[in-house]
Amino acid sequence: MESIKDKLKNNYIFVIIIFSMFAIDRFSKEYVIDFFLSYQEQSYYLYPFFNLTLIWNTGIAFGLFESDSNTYHFISVLIVMIIGILIIWLFKSKIFIEKIALSLVTGGALGNLLDRIKFNAVPDFIDLHYRDFHWFVFNVSDIVITIGIILLFLIDFLKKNEK
């Protein structure tokens, strides 16, 4: 049976991806929070389709299911359990691209989990829009989680087509 040290050694590239995604997310959030605290702005216009708008999300991805205190803590515990399952899945998987996808989802989930613990909310700030239509405001973790999940769906779809 492989020790945790051996598993980390055999999966070092994926551990690096997890911590890289986590670090990029942390840097972006800290930068944006500091910016908005310094300039006391509600929103910052960058391009005709892109603003920085800091909101505090107590729900799940993309501000869905805003929650009360009990639900918030339940969701946070659920996220910890999901991260554990993702790490086990990552170490057991033999498919390189699946490991990358799991690393992206895990890194993003860790970033948002830290915010839930540190701030009791997740800072979202990427505001894409077309005229008066605004998409959900989101953050870097949401992006990498979404990319990872799309990859997992594609992998599953391709596996089913092979059979």
Image (spheres, helix red, strand yellow):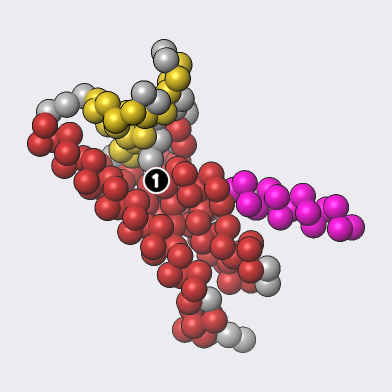
Residue closest to the far left: 38
Query: Which residue corresponds to the image point at 16% horizontal and 42% vertical from the top-left?
Result: 34
Query: Which residue corresponds to the image point at 71% horizontal and 55% vertical from the top-left?
Result: 155
Q: Say which quadrant the C terminus sits in.
A: bottom right
Residue 147 lies, in percent from the top left, at 55, 48
Dominant secondary structure of the residues highlighted in magenta in the image: helix
**Amino acid type of the residue tagged 1 in the rendering:** Val
Q: Vertical placement of 93 versus 30: above or below?
A: below
Residue 65 lies, in percent from the top left, at 47, 28
User: Does residue 160 appear to the left or right of 95 in the view shown?
Assistant: right
Residue 105 lies, in percent from the top left, at 51, 53
Query: Which residue corresponds to the image point at 43% horizontal and 70% vertical from the top-left?
Result: 16
User: Does residue 35 appear to the left or right of 151 in the view shown?
Assistant: left
Instruction: Please name whichever residue, 60 or 151, is drawn nearer the observer in this view of the structure.
Output: 151
Q: Vertical placement of 153 versus 57: above or below?
A: below
Residue at the spot of label 1: 140
In magenta stretch: residue 157: yes
Instruction: Please name whichever residue, 78 or 46, is drawn nearer the observer in this view of the structure.
Output: 46
* Mark 1 closeness class: few <14, some 14–19, many ≥20 residues within 10 Å: many
Task: Write down the quadrant of residue 22 in the picture.
Answer: bottom left
Query: Which residue corresponds to the image point at 51% horizontal and 61% vertical from the top-left?
Result: 103
Instruction: Please name whichever residue, 114 or 72, is drawn nearer the observer in this view of the structure.
Output: 114
- Magenta-drawn segment: 149-163
